[in-house]
Amino acid sequence: MTPSRPYLVRGLQEWMVDNNFTPYIVVDAGVQGVQVPQDFVSDGQIILNISPSAVRGLIISNDAIDFNARFGGVPMRVYVPIVAVLAIYARENGQGMVFGAEPGAPQPDDDPPLKSVKELDDKPDESLAKPKPSLKVVK
């Protein structure tokens, strides 16, 4: 059976965009094949804004998430194997999903540290001063 994670990520990303929310993904930057700006990695994780206004050429395939974005004004290609995606959530209300064990997927921590949000554009965002949403694994 194929993993459900890529289907859930695609569906949730589309739902968030359709409802004018900003989809963020939490990525395990230590997974082999992850190509993200290392300057923005914190505690082995990075939070990426994958909204249409923040990225170009977004492709969410069954194997990976691939797009181009700017980090601190510097353009970069980002490549995230789908097994490295730990969670997807909407910035505005925190709704989303934390991914658990699945064949070939890493085990997320019980409470992934979502300490800071790294914007993919150069504009400062006043909403970052608000308390950050948090995700918990419900067993």
Image: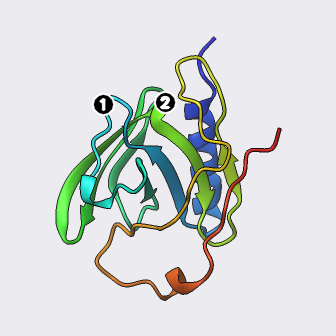
Q: Looking at the picture, how far across and down is residue 73, in whole percent?
A: 19, 71
Q: How crowded is mark 1: few (under 14 residues within 10 Å), some or many (20 or more)?
A: few
Q: Looking at the picture, how far across and down is residue 96, in whole percent?
A: 68, 53
Disc 2/disc 1 C-alpha distance (Å)? 10 Å
Label 1: which residue? 33
Residue occupying the point 35% across, 59% down = 55
Residue furthest to the top: 1
Q: Which of 123 and 47 is in front in this view?
A: 47
Residue type (three-letter) at the residue carrying disc 1 = Gly
Residue 138 lies, with reference to residue 20, above or below; the image says: above
Residue type (three-letter) at the residue carrying disc 2 = Val
Q: Which of 103 and 23 is in front in this view?
A: 103
Where, quadrant-wise, is the C terminus in this rendering?
A: top right
Residue 43 lies, with reference to residue 62, above or below; the image says: below
Residue 18 lies, with reference to residue 77, above or below; the image says: below
Relative horizontal placement of residue 95, taking residue 69 as reference (left or right): right
Residue occupying the point 20% across, 54% down = 76
Relative horizontal placement of residue 23, taking residue 66 as reference (left or right): right
Residue occupying the point 62% across, 56% down = 89
Label 2: which residue? 83
Residue furthest to the right: 139
Residue at disc 1, secondary structure: loop
Relative horizontal placement of residue 14, taking residue 52 as reference (left or right): right
Q: Looking at the picture, how far across and down is residue 126, in whole percent?
A: 48, 88
Q: Which of 44 and 58 is in front in this view?
A: 44
Q: Looking at the picture, how far across and down is residue 29, in whole percent?
A: 38, 43
Say which label, 2 or 1, has the lower sequence index. Answer: 1
CB contact under 8 Å: marks 2 and 1: no
Relative horizontal placement of residue 101, taking residue 30 as reference (left or right): right
